[in-house]
Image (cartoon, helix red, strand yellow):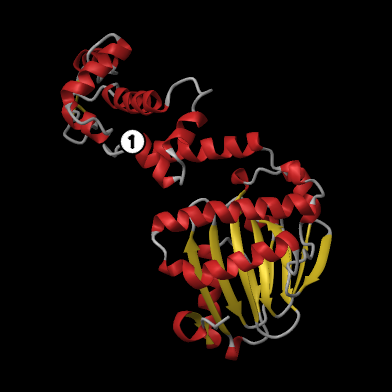
């Protein structure tokens, strides 16, 4: 694998070590790094956003890393990290487990203290960062795999390792929607590999994967309610699903997909209208903010759902708003002043 030092170095020399420490703490998680090679330290980092997961490539001179309970309290992405060591060797310890990993895979948990040390020269690794909620495996069973050397020279380990190397090489040439699809594949491969290490490939049941997919879709909808182009087809495309598969996922949900989007938009708009602000935004502006194509369509949907119009709901909210105490008035900033 070609080194990133020439074109993407984040640390070179003694000052470069400080920049590298800052980059790791900012981009990955709070951690303390130390080295005996600060004067000639070199390091490089690269990231690939794959949607549900993220792939990082890190190369550095020898370092010692410590993540304490205080670091965890300061910042925890709540990820498990599956690292492929591609050059050098790493001594890693976490949760009373310790091993030296070279040309293999190792799992760590960002929510637990850990310590790692390069035992040779320069080290290079590919790190798959997986949100814990996205991994359809029980956390209590995964604990026994932490800081263990997991073979990557055969079976599902070799398949996963080759896929991660290929992603690093060719991922930058892919479109965002392709990368999101590759992220789903990476998550599936990692889940299958870890389930195999636990001795039970059935540890990732279809029901758990379905729940995880639904959670991702719900989060996507919540973050994009204001987009008037948020449609079932768009959601299916962004999650690399067929429209039929997407509808099947919502078959047992309380609302259909389209009804869920509409109800979520209406609830956000109703909250805005109910703030009791005399000079609040016009109804049409609130409707547009939450993705409704027209004020008329919004008003009709609002009345059908809540039995009142948006204007009537706002007027009622104003009657419930606390008023300034008698003998006082409010200035332009909303502060009370005596009159």
Q: Look at the picture and state if 72 lies above or below 105.
A: above
Residue 147: image quadrant is bottom right
- Determine if residue 9 is in view: yes
How many marks the image carries: the answer is 1
Left or right relative to 4: residue 269:
left
Residue that label 1 marks: 231
Residue that sits furthest to the bottom in the current view: 40
* Towards the viewer: 257 or 274: 257
Q: Look at the picture and state if 19 lies above or below 163.
A: below
Residue, x 82% and y 49% (percent of image)? 199
Image x and y of residue 7, in percent: 45, 83
Q: Secondary structure at mark 1?
A: loop
Residue, x 69% and y 67% (percent of image)? 66
Left or right relative to 140: residue 15:
left
- Determine if residue 79 is in view: no
Image x and y of residue 232, in percent: 37, 35
Quadrant, the N terminus: bottom right
Image x and y of residue 245, in percent: 49, 35
Residue 28: image quadrant is bottom right
Residue, x 60% and y 65% (percent of image)? 163
Residue 21: image quadrant is bottom right
* Towards the viewer: 182 or 220: 182
Mark 1 Cα shell of 10 Å, populated few (<14), some (14-19), many (≥20): some
Quadrant, the C terminus: top left
Q: Look at the picture and state if 253 lies above or below 208.
A: above
């Amino acid at each position: 694998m070609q080194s990133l030092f020439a074109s993407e170095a984040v640390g070179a020399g003694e000052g470069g070590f400080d920049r590298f420490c800052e980059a790791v703490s900012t981009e990955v998680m709070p951690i303390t790094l130390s080295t005996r090679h600060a004067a000639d330290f070199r390091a490089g980092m690269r990231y690939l956003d794959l949607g549900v997961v993220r792939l990082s490539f890190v190369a550095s001179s020898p370092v010692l890393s410590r993540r304490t309970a205080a670091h965890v309290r300061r910042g925890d992405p709540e990820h498990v990290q599956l690292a492929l060591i591609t050059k050098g060797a790493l001594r890693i310890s976490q949760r009373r487990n310790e091993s030296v990993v070279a040309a293999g895979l190792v799992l760590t948990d960002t929510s637990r203290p850990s310590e790692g040390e390069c035992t040779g020269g320069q080290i290079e690794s590919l790190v798959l960062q997986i949100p814990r909620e996205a991994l359809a495996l029980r956390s209590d069973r995964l604990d026994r795999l932490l800081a263990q050397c997991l073979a990557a020279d055969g079976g599902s380990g070799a398949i996963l390792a080759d896929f991660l190397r290929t992603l690093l090489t060719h991922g930058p040439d892919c479109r965002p929607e392709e990368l999101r699809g590759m992220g789903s594949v990476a998550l599936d491969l990692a889940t299958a590999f870890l389930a195999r290490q636990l001795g039970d490939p059935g540890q990732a049941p279809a029901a758990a994967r379905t729940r995880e997919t639904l959670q991702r879709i719900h989060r996507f909808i919540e973050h994009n309610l204001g987009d008037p182009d948020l449609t079932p087809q768009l959601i299916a495309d962004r999650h690399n699903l067929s429209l039929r598969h997407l509808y099947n996922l919502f078959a047992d949900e309380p609302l259909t997909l389209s009804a869920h989007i509409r109800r979520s938009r209406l609830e956000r708009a109703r909250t805005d209208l109910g703030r009791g602000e005399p000079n609040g935004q016009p109804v049409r502006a609130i409707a547009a903010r939450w993705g409704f194509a027209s004020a008329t369509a919004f008003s009709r949907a609002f009345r059908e759902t809540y039995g009142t119009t948006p204007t009537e709901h706002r007027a009622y909210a104003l009657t419930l708003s606390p008023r300034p105490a008698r003998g006082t008035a409010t200035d332009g900033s909303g502060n009370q002043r005596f009159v």
